Image (tube, rainbow, N blue to C red):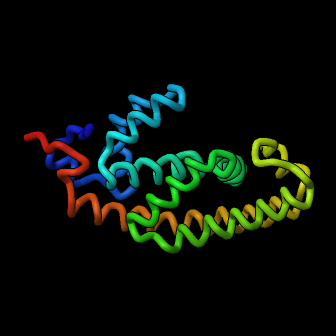
């Protein structure tokens, strides 16, 4: 189990978003740019709480910046069933039913589009939103809700981390 080393005053003062990132930074340094087998091995060594946080951050950090990134990242995760199920398991761990419902709704919207066009998840590109106003409008609304719900997600995760710091950080004096 890899724990982030954090000074007590820093741990106590981190905002919701930064707290989760700091807790996962050592793991992300181990897996960034590595192949799937290395990522799987590193994540398997984490506690359930760390795995849940890791998978939330995999979703959140890649999808939060724009409608395009939300669309492309959700499509990517759906193309990788193990990742998609792990993100959902992580959300269940934190009791984040609102985010789970939003992701299910996003999946339904994107599946319907893919089915209508006869395309696969792996064929999703950033340019899809440039050529499909119906898709752009639907994903834009989902993305707005993603941001609203993510604020609550971050609060739920913060509460869990602050109640169980020993699973995430090693407090330095």
What x and y, as percent, mark residue 91?
46, 63
Quadrant of the snapshot with the C terminus: top left
Q: Is residue 2 left or right of residue 9?
A: right
What x and y, as percent, mark residue 39?
46, 34
Quadrant of the snapshot with the N terminus: top left
Q: Is residue 49 left or right of residue 104?
A: left
Q: In this figure, what is the number of numbered marks? A: 0
Closest to the observer: 117 or 28?
A: 117
Residue at the far top: name it: 34
Residue 135 sits in which quadrant?
A: bottom right
Q: Is residue 37 left or right of residue 95?
A: right
Residue at the far left: name it: 173
What x and y, as percent, mark residue 55?
47, 50
Compared with 50, 33 (above or below) is: above
Residue 16 sits in which quadrant?
A: bottom left
Give the residue at x 37% y 67%. 156
Q: Is residue 19 visible?
A: no
Q: Is residue 156 visible?
A: yes
Give the residue at x 70% y 62%. 107
What x and y, as percent, mark residue 167?
23, 51
Give the residue at x 36% y 43%. 24
Residue 169 sits in which quadrant?
A: top left
Give the residue at x 81% y 42%. 123
Compared with 126, 146 (above or below) is: below
Closest to the observer: 18 or 169?
A: 169
């Amino acid at each position: 189990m890899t724990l982030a080393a954090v000074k007590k005053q820093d741990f106590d003062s981190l905002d919701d978003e930064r707290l989760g990132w700091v807790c996962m930074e050592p793991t992300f340094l181990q897996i960034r740019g590595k192949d799937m087998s290395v990522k799987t091995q590193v994540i398997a060594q984490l506690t359930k709480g760390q795995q849940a946080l890791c998978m939330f951050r995999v979703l959140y950090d890649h999808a939060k910046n724009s409608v395009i990134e939300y669309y492309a990242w959700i499509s990517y995760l759906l193309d990788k069933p193990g990742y998609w199920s792990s993100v959902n398991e992580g959300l269940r761990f934190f009791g984040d039913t609102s985010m789970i419902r939003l992701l299910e709704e996003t999946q339904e919207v994107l599946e319907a589009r893919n089915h209508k066009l006869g395309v696969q998840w792996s064929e999703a590109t950033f340019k899809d939103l440039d050529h499909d106003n119906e898709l752009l409008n639907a994903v834009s609304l989902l993305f707005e809700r993603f941001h609203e719900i993510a604020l609550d997600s971050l609060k739920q995760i913060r509460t869990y981390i602050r109640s169980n710091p020993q699973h995430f950080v090693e407090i330095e004096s």
